[in-house]
Image (spheres, rainbow, N blue to C red):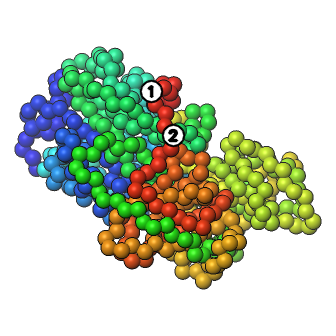
Amino acid sequence: MSCVEGLRADSSQFTLEGEPFCILGGSIHYFRVPRAHWEDRLLRMKACGLNTLTTYVPWNLHEPEKGTFNFQDQLDLKAFINLAAETGLWVILRPGPYICAEWDLGGLPSWLLQDKDMQLRTTYPGFVNAVNLYFDTLVAVIKPLMFEEGGPIIAVQVENEYGSYAKDESYMPFVRNCLQSRGIKELLLTSDNWKGLSYEGVEGVLKTINLQRLSFGAIQHLAEMQPQKPLMVMEYWSGWFDVWGEHHHVFHAEELLERGVSINLYMFHGGTSFGFMNGAMDYGTYKPQISSYAKPLPEVPSPCERRVYDPVTIQQHLSLWDSLHFTDKRSDVYCVLPDDVSNTLGWLAILQPFRSEKPVNMENLPVNNNNGQSYGYTLYETIITCGGTLNSKNNIRDRALVFVDRQCVGTLDYKTHELALPDGKGEMTLSLLVENCGRVNYGKALDEQRKGIVGDILLNHTPLRGFSIFCLDMKPCFMKRLMSSGQWKSDVKLPSIPGFFQARLYVEGPPKDTFIKLHGWGKGAVFVNGQNLGRHWFIGPQHHLYLPGPWLRSGENQIIVFEEQKADDKIFFAENPDHGKTIDVYKLPFCTLL
């Protein structure tokens, strides 16, 4: 246990170990950077003259199923913090439980939404109980890393930007007590934008501010709220997130204020929201975010070597329809929902696939040990006997490809709610392939982030019934079953779309970082050796996907592209990313940055 004082905020300047201390911080998220690159990124931070690392902790990765925790491998938080200490960096930890971070549901697990009455970020009992169980495990991991215990963590943030949410005045004291009652004694902080600072705050917790640009007005506002306290910008935004179909956002460099203000660059290194973990924004219009997360600051050491591999040719393809028997088979069910669909679901074992009289949202599907489906796609199928007008009643979350007898007839999403179905003879199979494009990570809509089909779908004003439902979360276990299938077809000139397309990349010597280019493709996701790199979509702005060298191996590597719309016969590689057309963030309306 340390005999010297940790970080203190007892006057207008921080002190550490009894000496004046100015925090020069930078954010790196261990969950967005391949573990093999952690040391490289931390060394770059140290080389830039920074003295403090800040990182969030994503609850939804560390507890993907209720009571099942993962702090190993890529999620080894203890190893990341110890590596920061070995690099000579202090650490400010931001454990949530809510983190925002442009991360699915702000880092909250989707299984929380199985409770129809759930009120996230409040003292609602269901949420409080889940937070307590999570913090029991999390604090046991981080407490030995506190400064008092001889570790590098000098401060801990209480929740994140709650002043902009502020639904429950008892909630922030609850989170503070969650930390303190479990033995966390380091300095506690909150983090809010200018508007959020108006929230009353929490006794004994230092306020900090988040800014897109430093200004005397903002700093003075914080100083007046906390006289004779240190001033800190917890997030000085050195980049901004992008959404599909819009431009890539950039900042022009600014000089920092020279008035003793502590600062954290958010982000120092943005990394990648691999897989389906991107968040979304919703200020009246839903907009899912891309996989690339912010633009890194200029790097001081020599960059890691990259390689432009030769193009690879698609060798085999597998129709989506032929992949359905690889979906989750652990719970064979038939469910008849009562008129009050909010009732607890009772599942009866019968035949594959999952069957339900009414549509069931992703989170309430009986998969993943009854924790529901968190990410990816869900396929809903039912029998119809006529064409006509299909109306989603805005119950599609978030985007659906619509098929009649497995022929695509259109798309439904948050903008398009109606679609004309063709007439036919006899019974026809109506299929809706629904994609969860990312849960909102910021704002008042967190409680409404259930995905899939969340209510009735009407055909000619009549609700559809009798659904077969397939979970296509495309987890590693699914991809492994898929890769071992003997049903792949080699005639790539007549591919079935949607479907999976397979190519092999041969790497000579040690693998290097690269970027995948999918020019000529439409929309979907890319998997390399079973790892989900993220989504691709021709509308941009992002046109390349980052492929970390550590995820490749010398010799043969398997690339699988899931494609919804159109496929090419080749996959290309690039040395540098293509972020698309740019727009200056400072030219955007200020409200879009809150």
Q: Are marks 1 and 2 in contact (CB under 8 Å)?
A: no
Mark 1 secondary-structure assignment: helix
Report x, y in % for residue 72: 33, 64
Q: Is residue 470 visible?
A: no
Instruction: Write the residue at 76% across / 59% down.
Output: 408
Is residue 153 placed above or below 402 in the rendered structure? above
* Side of 17 relative to 340 (left or right): left
Which callout, 1 or 2, points at the residue further toward the start of the chain? 2
Please identify the residue farthest to the bottom as the structure is shown: 486
User: Residue at (58%, 75%) from the top-left corner?
Assistant: 315
Image position, residue 192 (x, y; %): 38, 30
- Return the x and y of residue 386 as percentages of the image width and height: 90, 59
Name the amino acid type tagged 1: Tyr
| Residue 266 vertical placement versus 422 (above, below) | above
Nearer the camera: disc 1 or disc 2:
2
**Mark 1 surroundings within 10 Å by alpha-carbon count, few (fewer than 14), some (14 through 19), many (20 or more):** some
Q: Which mark is residue 586?
A: 1
User: Which residue is rendered at x = 64% and y = 49% of the image?
Assistant: 398
Which residue: 70% across, 69% down? 496
Percent across and percent down for residue 121 are: 46, 40
Amino acid residing under circle 2: Lys
Q: Specify the quadrant of the image occupied by residue 244.
A: top right
Q: Secondary structure at mark 2?
A: loop
Q: Which residue is mark 2?
A: 581
In the rendered structure, the answer to whether residue 85 lies left or right of residue 132 reads left
Q: CA distance from mark 1 to mark 2?
A: 16 Å
